[in-house]
Structure formats: C-alpha cells, structure tokens
Image (cartoon, rainbow, N blue to C red):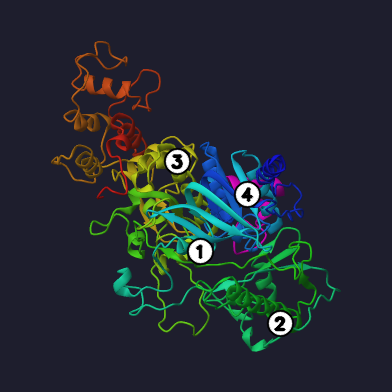
Amino acid sequence: MALKLLLGLCFLLILKSSGVSSDIQNHQTKLFIMEKEFQTITADILVVGGGVSGVCAAIQAARLNTEVILVEETDWLGGMLSAAGVSAIDGNHKLPSGLWGEFRQKLYDYYGGSENLETGWVSNTHFEPSVANRILHDWIAEYPQIRLIKSFWPVKVFVKNNRVSGVEFSNENGDKLDITAEITIDATEWGDVLKMAGCPYRSGRESRKESSEKYAPEKSDSCVQDLTFVAILKDYGPGANKTIEKPAGYDPSFYRGSCNYKTESGSLIDATKMMQYGRLPNNKYMINWPKKGNDYNGALIEKDRAGRAEHLRKAKQYTLGFVYFMQTELGLKNYGIDTEEFLTEDNLPLKPYVRESRRVNGKVYLNVHDIEKPHAESKRPYYQQAIAVGDYPIDHHHAEGSLPEAETFPRIPSFSVPFGCLIPNEKQGILAAEKSISVTHIVNGATRLQPVVMQIGQATGAAAALCVKQKTPSENINIRELQQILLDANMWLLPFVDIQPGDVGFQELQRIGLCGLIQGEGVPEGWANRTYIYPDKTVTYAETANAIRILFNKTISVDLQTDVPVSRRRLLYMFKSFITDTGENYKTSPFSDISEDDPEFSIICYFKTKGALYWIKGEKFDADTLVSRREFAIMTDRAFEPFNKFTLTLNDDI
C-alpha cells in the first residue's frame, strides 16, 4: 500500500508539471499511468483540447482561482495557430480583445516589435508555429491552478441525470485516465466530447427553412468546409534544390491555376506573389493556399480515429503534391520543407487546420441575419448576451464542384457572439468552445478564426469558473456578471472599433450598449469590417428619449427635431422627472457658478455625487456644452447602473 501511495503521489506531481518548457523544440513529454488505482483525478474544471480556445479557457479560469485540468492529445499547445501551422492571424487586428491581445503582445515582445510580424500579405501578424507553442507552454506554466496532461484523448463521457460529470481518456499505449469535474469544456477540434455526451448537434449546411437564412441552400446537405494540412517551407537559397520525392498519386492538374492569374482588382498573382502570402519571420513560408492549393475536401467529422487517420494521410499527400508542383513546375525548388519547425516524421504539422466541426444545438442558434442587423426590431437582440467580437467576413473553403448548390453570402459588419451559443440545449455540466458553438454553417465562416475562438475560450473559462463558484448551472449565470469579468479582462463585447479598453468611457459605452441604450453603426469594409460608436459625436434627443424609454419604461415626447443635439442642462432636465432622490438634502453647491436657486441644482448635485459628471474641471459646470456619446454613457451608466438594473440570464426573454 505504501508503494501504491508513493506511485500515486508521483503521478499527481507529473500531472502538475507535465509539458512545460521554455525550449521551443523540447515538447516531447508524454504521460503514462503507473498504477490502475490512481487513474481517477478530480478538478473544478476539465478542459478537453489544448487548442487555442482550450488554452484560453484554462488561463481565464485559473485567473478566477479555480482548479483546471487541461488535456491535449498532441504534444503541442495552441491547435490551429501552432500545432496545425496556421501561424498568420485572420481578423481582429484593430480589436485585440482579451487574451488574443495579450498573446499578440507576447509575439511583439519575442520578435522585437509589431513591424517584424508584418512579413506577409494575408495578415498583420505572422509568426513561427513553434514560437507560439513555446509561448503558450510558458504561459500555462505561470498558473499553479492548471494541471496539463498531454498525449491523451477522450474516449467516453460520464453522464448522470443529464449532467456531464467527467471524461475517460486513453493514450497510444492503451492507458486509461478518468477525470471528473464540476464542469467540462469541449475544446476539441471536432466537437467529439459533445457527441459522446449525447448533445444534439448540427453538421454540414442547414436548409433555408431550418436556419431561417435567405442565403442558405434550399435543401440541407453534409458539406463542410475543407480542411488543410499546412506546410512550413524555408528558402534555402538560390542554388539549393530541395525538391521532395514525387508523392504517390501526384497529379499536376490538381494544382494548375493556383497562380499566374489576375485578381478582380487586376493584381497579378504569380509564384513570387503567392509565396509572400504567408511569409513568416526568419525566412519561412506558411503554405495554406486556398486557390488550387492544399485545401482538402473530406468528410471527417463523423469518422473514428482510424477513419480520420486515413483521410489525414491523404490530406498530407495532397499538400506534398502541391509542394512538389511548386518545386517542379513553378521553379521554386529552393523552397523546401523546414525540418526544424515540426519534429514529426514527415516534418508536417501535428494536426490539420479544421475549419468546421460539429455545431452544438445551443440555447442561442445564431444565424447570419442576427449579425447582419443586430438591432433590427424584428430580430432577436442577441447582442445583449455578447461575450466575444469578430470583424472577419464570411469566408468559406469548398473545393470546386463539391457543393450541390452554390453558396452566396451577405456582406456583414463586425459582430458579437452571444453567450447562449456556448450552452448545449439538453445537457448540463458542459460548455462548447473552439468551433463547436451554436451557429449556422454560414456564420461559422466568420466565427472560426483564431482571435474569435480565443475569446470564445476565454468566455467559457470565465463562465465555468462562475458555475463552480456559485454552484449553479450555466443557464442560471447572471450574464452581466460574466460580461463584467470579461470587460475587466480588456475584452470588447460589442465591436466598437473607435474606442479601446483603458480609454475614458470604454466600459460605460460597452455596458449601456449591451443594455440597448445606445447603438453602434456597422459598416462592412472588406476583410476588416467595422462598427463605430462615435464616442465624441453629440447625443441626440431621439437617442436620449430611447434610453429613457428603456431605463424607466416611460415614453417621453420630444418637442424638437429628433436629431437635434442635447446640451448638458437639457439632458439633466430630461432625466430629472425620473429620479426620486434629486437632492433636497443637498444644501451646498458643488460648483462655484451654480447656486442653490438654479432650477437644476438638485439634479446636478445628484449626478455629481454619483461621479457621473466626469467633464467637470475644477468647479466650473458649463451647462450649455453639448453632450457627447462618451459623456452620455458615463452619465447614464454611473447614475443608473443599467447592468444592475437589467440583469440577464439565458432563462430571460430578451
């Protein structure tokens, strides 16, 4: 028995410290179960999948002082932005929200500034996958609340009384590991835990009737986005010949048309231009080329591990065929596969880039019209539940001829992801992350990108921590409390691009926007969509009247044109009749130029004591100054606290 106890303690120590290393290439740690009696461990939160959302979920939960076990099937952390080699960030360059912004800053610090990551033309942020892996390992190591387990994958989910209580894992040696937790987060690439738990889900394209999207196909089908096995190449110099062995089944016709064509704008995409697409620091090149390149069309979602492995072998061969084509037909023989980036047998990534997985049936089912016009009166105001933002357009990868009915997409503004998309309809104790959230196939084309998925992970980590601390199901969480945690973590919840965390009025504009008291203007702008709140624009009578209607459930008549701007005195007067404590107790004027006889004396005192008159400098109050939206937000938020007034859960009818 003493020996068994010693073995058990040793095993727990291994779990505590596994896989953390500051050496970029030294990530080959594997865990092995030494004694069957010690195969069950417990934590507050179990995160299955050490991809980009899983890492962010674990970090955010740890910051809220909950115990987390993070399990990853490979030896790397970071999923698509590291282990899959997609080391060029798509979207959110001007919305560096939460942990995405922190990760980007770590890249800036490593490479010596943002300009050193602007090496290609597909992104503003390029980096080596192994550097991302190292950064994420070191980051996880900062939190003693996180236990990292690698080289195990889920094989069974424990469900009792419709609640997930844990997961059984296995490794390549057949060792078993059971982990129980208060709440489980599915951060896998395919949504495997959700299926094992019996959560209903969707995959493929919904019909127009099912999704209520006018852009959806008439009939549903099983078509999902292509995956890609990325290759990282290196330029070995003009005299080098790094041509690989001709891959089995190679057909050059598959790749003809990948370059030497003109875009709609007239730009020529030749071989040189194509190579600059995903150029990384240190003379490396990410090969993730969408046109006649290395996208692979294969239905892998419902395959078992063996079935997926066979398809992934074919996907690798397809990528190697493209590399061979580039070397032999495009004259790029000096570009060879980097043998130091991935220490795998073939020097290709540890996993493919999975663009689309199972999509859980959630409490909120987000369709494209919800993000096209989030404030439309006829639509559901899901923006009020926002937990993440994105600015990428809808971008799908489907091989030519693979769709029975062609796709068309609308142009969209930047958007928010609502909390209800993370919560399965029919099971408790589990949250969806990564690309398995409850959205339509069309919307997945915008929510699948790295920055959005990082925020989704961060939000699931925060929500899971609240569930544990409050001992409550996720649907009972006060979403306002969750949103405040995320705002304090420097996250955008509404994608107001013209004001940033730390700016005066940022949180106030976010909060009153989330309560519907003010609206931004969404503008589709190519590959970086925008929503503007115009913080320094003057607020109008119409906007004030709308805020009063929502705050006090009262309709007021506006006797002037609705677009007329409002002065400070007039705004205070409009609010005055809705405040019961207007300051009969205030006997001394807080301002040198406002006397006790002033008609607005009491209301001015009221707002001053609430800290809602931020514009005051010294003791002067200029009542005739027009009110900006920033000032309006500060006044409204601080004086009336709409987050506390309008609490929100998934059980509420919004």
Coordinates of residue 499 in the picture (x, y in percent): 45, 43
Residue furthest to the right: 239
- Disc 2: which residue: 325
Quarter of the image that includes the N terminus: top right
Q: Residues within 10 Å of mark 2 (few under 14, many from 20)?
A: many
Residue 37 circle label = 4
Q: Residues within 10 Å of mark 4 (few under 14, many from 20)?
A: few
Residue 495 seen in this snapshot: no
Residue 192 circle label = 1
- Residue at 68%, 79% in the rendered image: 317
- Which region shows up in magenta? 100-127
Amino acid marked by disc 2: Phe
- Residue at 32%, 59% in the rendered image: 373
- The CA span between labels 3 and 1 is 23 Å
Tags 1 and 2 touching, CB below 8 Å:
no
- Residue at 56%, 53% in the rendered image: 178
Amino acid marked by disc 4: Glu
- Disc 3: which residue: 468
Quick one: label 3 or label 1, which is nearer the N terminus?
Answer: 1
Quick one: label 3 or label 2, which is nearer the N terminus?
Answer: 2
- The CA span between labels 1 and 4 is 27 Å
- The CA span between labels 4 and 2 is 54 Å
Amino acid marked by disc 3: Val
Residue 266 seen in this snapshot: yes
Q: Secondary structure at mark 1?
A: helix
**Magenta stretch encompasses residue 579:** no
Q: Is residue 226 above or below residue 636?
A: below
Q: Secondary structure at mark 3?
A: helix
- Tag in front: 1 or 4: 4
- The CA span between labels 1 and 2 is 35 Å
Coordinates of residue 200 in the picture (x, y in percent): 39, 65
